[in-house]
Image (cartoon, rainbow, N blue to C red):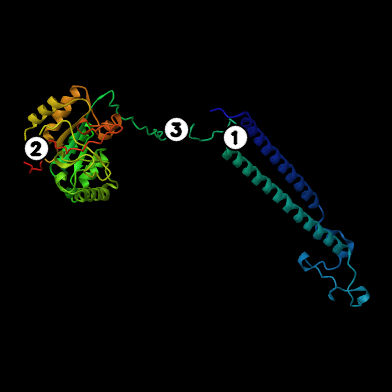
Amino acid sequence: MSRPLWSRLLGPAAVVAVVVVGLIAALVGRRRTATTSQLSSFPSAASVRAETPAAAGVNEHRDDDELPVSGSTDTPGPAGSGHPSPPGPHKASAERVGVAGQSRTGRRRPATRVALAASLLTLCTVGSVMVSGIAPSTFTIASAASSDIPLPPEIAAIVEEPRPDCTVLKCAVLTFDDGPDRHTTPALLDILESRGIPANFFVLGTLIAGNEDIVLRMQRLGMGVENHTWDHPNLTMLSPAGVTDQLARTNQELSRVLGYTPRYMRPPYGAWTPGYTPTHGMRPVLWEVDPQDWLYRNSATVVQHVEGQVAPGDVILLHDIHRSSVDAVPGIIDSLHGRGYTFVTLDDLFEARPNCPVEFYCAPPAPGPGMAAPLPAPLAATPSPVLPAN
């Protein structure tokens, strides 16, 4: 990716600035060094003493380290008065040398500091140029775009697939009652998962405890988990309070396991009275296709009954507590797929038919003006009692 013009110009400008600063620092350091060299050319104390006639015959045995201190009584004064003599030429020269040495030392240190500061400034400038990414093209900067380090793959956007349009497709819904069963329901879930087929399970409240893992697997696979009452009574034989208790207790168990309550309920045996039997805020669901798998414990027979009754938009009733019913599911799937059917959930089907999702229990039309509402008649479908599994 090409950089903007200001970035391409700023890189060389920064390098030029660094070079100018370095040259100035070098010139300043060189000038300081020349000044120090000139100062170091002054004669030392020893040479001054040797060249001074007054000092030639006096204290010849003393070294530089033993020069008398001004004001000392050891230095003979004039005519042996015992007073210190005035400073001679050698002392003045020594003082000049000391001053020159102090000047030389004092000038050397600022030059060293200037050079060090210039070096640090140069390093800092180069480092900032390299890190900021405005270096000229002659520099090689390791980046994600230029290096050979493999980049992680981009995270694909999660796109939710649209629901099947059951106004166009030939839809069918598989529903299973009376479970979960510890032995047969997991085998059924294996079949549905391997084929990618959704379904709805109407479970009994009394069978949830101890089978929480199965119910959670239903949810994880995208199956609908629905309410089939607490212990499978005929709701038309119970009071409204008794029906509500059956549904509420089951919802409490489902909420404990799944974290939510279902949207659908199925009355056992299909026995309920529209407008009278409580549904506890759920939508009642019956069926159109009943192969009577609870009576015919033969997989081939169950498949034939489904094939002979099914129509687009139908709800198929099966029971996952029977091994023969579970074994019939692959044949049902293959047969209906071959006829162009698409398996969906109740949500998909009801979205296409919100007013009459299942023909078997469509709500009666609203009465016209001045007409009394007809009394609801109890509905009773083909019984499907809970029988012991083979």
Q: Residues within 10 Å of mark 1 (few under 14, many from 20)?
A: many
Q: Could you tell me which secondary element the residue under label 1 belongs to?
A: loop
Badge 3 is on which residue? 148
Earlier in the chain: of badge 3 and badge 1, it is: 1
* Residue 387 image point, x, y percent: 8, 43
Earlier in the chain: of badge 2 and badge 1, it is: 1
Seen as rendered, the residue at the extreme top is: 339
* Residue 84 image point, x, y percent: 88, 73
Q: Could you tell me which secondary element the residue under label 2 belongs to?
A: loop
Badge 1 is on which residue? 135
Badge 2 is on which residue? 294
Three-letter code, disc 1: Ala
User: Going 86% across and 58% down the picture, which residue do you hit?
Assistant: 51
* Residue 105 image point, x, y percent: 75, 56
Given residues 165 and 102, the one toward you in this image is: 165
Given residues 182 and 304, the one toward you in this image is: 304
